[in-house]
Image (tube, grey):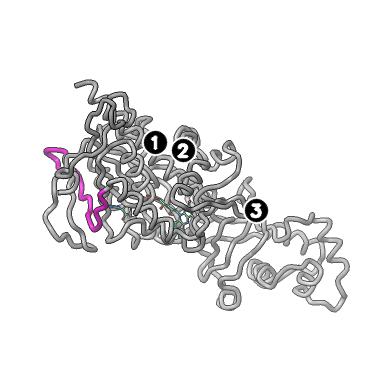
Amino acid sequence: MGWLSRPRLRGVNADGSTNSLDGPVVIGPSAAVIGGGPGGLMAAEQLARAGASVTVYEQMPSMGRKFLIAGRGGLNLTHSEPLPQFLARYGDKQSELTPAVQAFPPSAVQDWCKGLAQDSFIGSSGRVFPSGFRATELLRSWLRSLEGLGVDLQRSQRWLGWDETTGALLVGSADQDKLLAPPKMLFPDITIMSLGGGSWERTGSDARWVPKFLAAGISVTELQAANSGFLVQWSSEFRSKFEAAPLKNIALTVNNTTVRGEAMISAHGIEGGCIYAVGRELRSAWEEQGAACIEIDLRPDLSLEQLEQKLLHSRPKDSTSTRLQRCLGLPPVSVGLMREATNNSLPRDHRELAQLVKALPLHLASPEGIDRAISTAGGVAFDELDDRYMIKKRPGVFVAGEMIDWEAPTGGYLLQATMSTAVAAARGAMNWWTEQLNAT
Ligand SMILES: Cc1cc2nc3c(=O)[nH]c(=O)nc-3n(C[C@H](O)[C@H](O)[C@H](O)COP(=O)(O)OP(=O)(O)OC[C@H]3O[C@@H](n4cnc5c(N)ncnc54)[C@H](O)[C@@H]3O)c2cc1C
């Protein structure tokens, strides 16, 4: 049954270094990794390389489903910007995540990718992608490499909780909501959990672990949609004309935060990098006031005065839409958005028009539902963890990835922190286990 009956082929020395064939050898620990997303797989890889006998339990019939979805439009593994700038993307959790990201930084992710025979490349925005662009090939060679390391990959196996009396892990065969066999009780030396956040439930990230953690007395900050679009009540005319139209090269301001980039009009609202980048600010505005408003600069490269000058060159008979398109080069979606946001009453005065182009107010109704979010904020509170990512109330149980309480914008910061925390948890687990061994 899983790792319990498998021979342990590798080992670690008592000081935590991996064994050599002729050196002093002790048997490595048995390790259960729960969750076969990038966090779980990275933890499994690190543990196996350090000499543990590893089994991964994934509740879905295949590993890495969200990883594959993440790669659909290009798998953005990490970002190439300087580390101080990079670390600042983790906002109020920067200091908690810094040691893990410094120990396994963006360059280590690129090296790891290379080790799987996939060079990475840096896109024009500084984002880093695998040469295959999508996740499919990378995941395939990752799983092959894990099997080569002796990792036992168990699919359709769901962690159901901890046995109240013995503290054992309860794991059962799963098919959707049905349990196909009575749960097994597992007593691994170490456990790493990387159960993901609470979006895209169909990939397995269903957040069903939350009540189990709460019942075990482990604080979990409420999961909330992050990197998600916001709903806007578009008129049917605007929606039918501009659904899926990109708003390129805009600047967007919420309170005192301004970001530049792109957004996209969706059927029910607005989404895209620019919106995600101010997601935290929008969420708190929405929580405090029940609504949120953004200001869009549709021509951030030109000053108000330059826009005014350009508008002066319009022909007297030109309609306002034509002036905006011809004199300022605004695309139809931007002009449409100006009409939508002003209830179809654009000012004729060139100064007022220029002001509107520089600061178009758009009212957002609410965040889109959590299931459509790219990631979730919230998760296991850092206070519950020691600096090895071990749950203080559950010695020997470590956590990694998106299930921990941090958030970041898109741009590769999500997978980077997922992998860095997985490496930190695996290294922490091996150190903890070695300490236990020395103490006995
Ligand atoms: C559309 C989309 C695009 C994205 N694009 C990017 C991108 O380009 N770059 C980037 O950095 N990030 C991206 N992300 C985010 C990234 O995919 C996640 O942050 C990352 O997958 C988190 O990894 P994880 O291992 O922590 O969790 P997950 O990938 O969610 O994996 C958790 C695993 O645990 C399993 N599990 C849960 N409960 C149990 C249980 N009880 N028993 C057994 N198994 C269980 C789940 O089935 C799942 O496979 C994207 C996400 C989405 C949805």
Say which mark, if any, is on residue 260: 3
Say which mark, if any, is on residue 104: 2
The secondary structure type at the circle numbered 3 is strand
| Residue range corresponding to the magenta coloring | 152-167
Labels 1, 3: front one? 1
Q: Residue at x 62, y 53 (%)?
A: 125
Give the mark nearest the N terminus, 3 or 2: 2
CB within 8 Å, label 2 to label 1:
yes
- Find out whether residue 409 is within the magenta segment: no
The amino acid type of the residue labelled 3 equals: Arg
Left or right for 65, reference 335: left
The amino acid type of the residue labelled 2 equals: Phe
Name the quarter where the C terminus is drawn: top left
Instruction: Identify the residue under disc 1.
Output: 424
Q: Residue at x 32, y 44 (%)?
A: 44
Give the mark nearest the N terminus, 2 or 1: 2
